Amino acid sequence: MKYFDLHCDTVSYLFDEQLDFDNPVTHIAAHKLGAISTYKQVFALWCGNDPELAPKRYEPLLAFGKAMCKEHDLQPLFSIEGAELLGCDPALLPQAKRDGVISVGVVWNFDNPLCGCAKSDSKRGLSDEGRVFVETAVKERMAVDVSHASTEGFWDILSVSKGQTVATHSNARAVCPHFRNLWDEQVIALCAHDGLIGLNLYSEFLHGKKADIHSILTHIEHMLSLGAEDNLAVGADFDGCDSLPVGISGFEDIPALYKAVAAPFGEAIADKIFFQNACDFFLRIGA
Ligand SMILES: [Zn+2]
């Protein structure tokens, strides 16, 4: 099968834990890759917990990710999770694009000078600097990721990045009321703009401790009811989440998940969700 995943924290996790990709603990690991014939993975370069230290992380983290991709014959596709990694400086975006960064998330779990985040209740949207940052990312033909943005930030970003907007790892809030999930209006607006939404397999965003494969299907069914057939993808959040739903242990279970999705929704829709929609989106924006 073909699999395109919009978000995992594997590179950042391995870098921080000083582990090799060939290890027995991570959700995605070298020995699991054989499960998928065509595999495209966007590896998140995470800003880390300290915004002061974040700019110093970018170069070594990127170098680690590039070396890992080269060694294991993976396409080096990266995203930025928290613009602190670039010191919130739009002037660094063109180089990031040349480095293989195809998607950039303006904020992570703390507000920054560019935008408020989903986790805080500051209700801050995009600042003037934030707007310049997003405009620059758009010009560089990068996707702009709203997954961690505040609700206000979401709408501000979407008004600038329009058809280049992606929620790389967020589910439906109508199904699971978590602050990181998308309201129905947000899903509908992303679809109207030809944006992209990556289903997150973190159990907290699916159905809390009771999450299982059926919970994933419920989110898919809801997204499809809102018109997301050509906009839905997967951003599993492997190695960035503490718990996965019952029935999923990591990358090795993606083929089983594909089958579970194809059974009720059909292979054509499963193919779109697991690969084609993401492929089409990045091709269209020229990332
Ligand atoms: Zn995240």
Image (cartoon, helix red, strand yellow):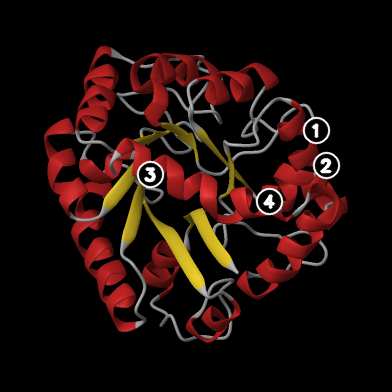
**Which tag, 1 or 4, sits closer to the chain's start?**
1
Residue underneath mark 3: 282
**Which tag, 3 or 2, sits closer to the chain's start?**
2
Residue at x 44% of width, y 38% of height = 108
Amino acid under disc 3 = Phe
Amino acid under disc 4 = Ala
Residue at x 56% of width, y 50% of height = 235
Residue underneath mark 4: 268
Q: Secondary structure at mark 4?
A: helix
Residues at discs 3 and 4 in contact (Cβ within 8 Å): no
Name the one closer to the observer, 188 or 12: 188
Q: Residues within 10 Å of mark 3 (few under 14, many from 20)?
A: some
Q: Secondary structure at mark 1?
A: loop
Quadrant of the snapshot with the C terminus:
top left
Residues at discs 2 and 4 in contact (Cβ within 8 Å): no
Mark 3 to mark 1: distance in Å? 28 Å
Mark 1 to mark 2: distance in Å? 7 Å
How far across and how far down the image is residue 5, in percent? Answer: 52, 56
Mark 3 to mark 4: distance in Å? 20 Å
How far across and how far down the image is residue 155, in percent? Answer: 48, 15
**Which tag, 3 or 1, sits closer to the chain's start?**
1
Vertical side of 181 occupied by 192: above or below: above
Mark 1 to mark 4: distance in Å? 24 Å
Name the one closer to the observer, 111 or 218: 218
